[in-house]
Amino acid sequence: MDREELFSRLLAFDRDAFLTYGSSKIKYECYIVGGGAMLIMGLIPRATHDIDVLRCTAYELISLMPKYDMNMNVTAHIGCFADDYSSRAEKIDLDTKLIDFYTLSLEDLVVSKLASGREQDFEDIHQPAVVQKIDWDKLDELIDLAIEGMVGDYSARELRDFYNDYKEEFKK
């Protein structure tokens, strides 16, 4: 799906949630990560096949997600996200009734994509639009936090090596 289709699905998900569960005095929150988040931010030119959600504050909404190609499979990689990711998240400007959608910060997304080790994720973070917008000091901090939170020494070393190579290639 392209960027417009992604926005359309988020709005349809919100509308379906509103019709199913009714109004609320507070809005629920959904945090979008992965390629979908980078597509929303206008940083990658490719389409995505799904919308990865790191967290949704309403458990009952999770059952509606598959209908809109949304999933929470990223919980397997939750360890690469700093605990305070929501403090850096950026609200997506959509006219919603029940759900506020957010993308994680670019730096949080880069950490997760480095930690994944997947070719597509490396391609995403090598896009010129991504590299030009990175706050390298913030990225240094988040990499250190991710490494501190990793269970295995191998994973921590691998992330550090991926990051050092990435930083050497792009930081001026």
Image (tube, helix red, strand yellow):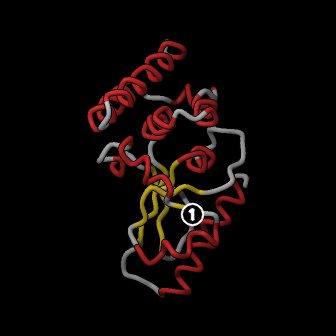
Which of the pair 24/107 is nearer the observer?
107
| Residue 142 spot, x, y in % from top left | 34, 33
Classify 79 as above or below 161: below
Q: Which residue lies under the disc numbered 1? A: 94
Residue pictured at 63% horizontal, 26% vertical: 128
Q: Is residue 31 left or right of residue 16?
A: left
Residue pictured at 45% horizontal, 85% vertical: 23
Classify 33 as above or below 71: above
Q: Please, what is the three-letter code of the amino acid marked with disc 1? A: Leu
Q: Quadrant of residue 95?
A: bottom right
Residue pictured at 56% horizontal, 86% vertical: 19
Which of the pair 163/131 is nearer the observer?
163
| Residue 96 spot, x, y in % from top left | 54, 71
Which of the pair 89/150 is nearer the observer?
150
Q: How many marks?
A: 1
Q: Quadrant of residue 38?
A: top right
Classify 86 as above or below 169: below
| Residue 70 spot, x, y in % from top left | 58, 63
Q: Is residue 55 left or right of residue 5?
A: left
* Residue furthest left as drawn: 148
Q: Residues within 10 Å of mark 1 (few under 14, many from 20)?
A: few
Residue pictured at 45% horizontal, 23% vertical: 163
Q: Secondary structure at mark 1?
A: loop
Q: Quadrant of residue 24?
A: bottom left
Quarter of the image with the N terminus in it: bottom right
Classify 81 as above or below 125: below
